[in-house]
Amino acid sequence: MITIISGTNRSNSNSFKVAKLCKEILEESQVASQIFSLENLPNDFLASEMYQDHSDHFQKTITQYIHGAEKLIFVVPEYHGSYPGALKVFLDAISSDDIMDKKTMLVGVASGHAGGIRPLGHLTDVLHHLRAEVFSRKPKLSYIDQLIDSKGEFDQKTVKSLSGNIELFLNY
């Protein structure tokens, strides 16, 4: 099982759309996957789930989406030159034992030209600190609004590129 984490709590985000595309690609390869969107975290998450004082709901979430996953794909938008605070709080709330030795892939999403290269670097540092394994290929989806048409479909170049990277990740 692969968990795809949509790394923002913003509703109807482009990151979630990319996460759904990743799931479709994995389904085509007949790989079981699930999406965990940070928008499903409770509004009081910062106060309620920190420092190992987890609710039953949050513990079930970690068990399903983190413990139950062989690998993780993080879809990471760029917010103010880094990744979203909601993702940092989520990573702070889980134990390093929860993610240690997990193989991870990072996908950058940005409205600008660099495709989220800075947040991917920042997140790589944090994941290495947590002793997760980070796949070296990190697709960067620049000008994300131009890659998705009015029907919510991605252009074929993006689909092909992301599919190729995911295929390599599956063999990682």
Image: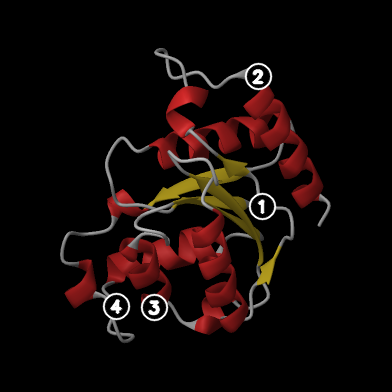
Residue under label 2: 156
Outermost residue toward the right? 171
Kind of residue at badge 1:
Lys
Residue under label 3: 92
- Tags 2 and 4 in contact by the CB under 8 Å rule? no
- Tags 2 and 1 in contact by the CB under 8 Å rule? no
Closer to the observer: label 4 or label 1?
1
Q: Residue 27: x, y in percent?
A: 65, 32
Mark 4 or mark 1: name the one nearer the start of the chain. Answer: 4
Residue 111, compared with residue 130, is above or below; it is above
Kind of residue at badge 2:
Gln
Residue under label 1: 138
Mark 2 or mark 4: name the one nearer the start of the chain. Answer: 4
Closer to the observer: label 2 or label 4?
2
Q: Residue at x 42, y 13 (%)?
A: 151
Kind of residue at badge 4:
His
Residue under label 4: 54
Q: Residue at x 29, y 50 (%)?
A: 39
Question: Tag 1: Cα neighbours inside 10 Å, few (<14), some, or many (≥20)?
Answer: some
Residue 18, compared with residue 63, is above or below; it is above
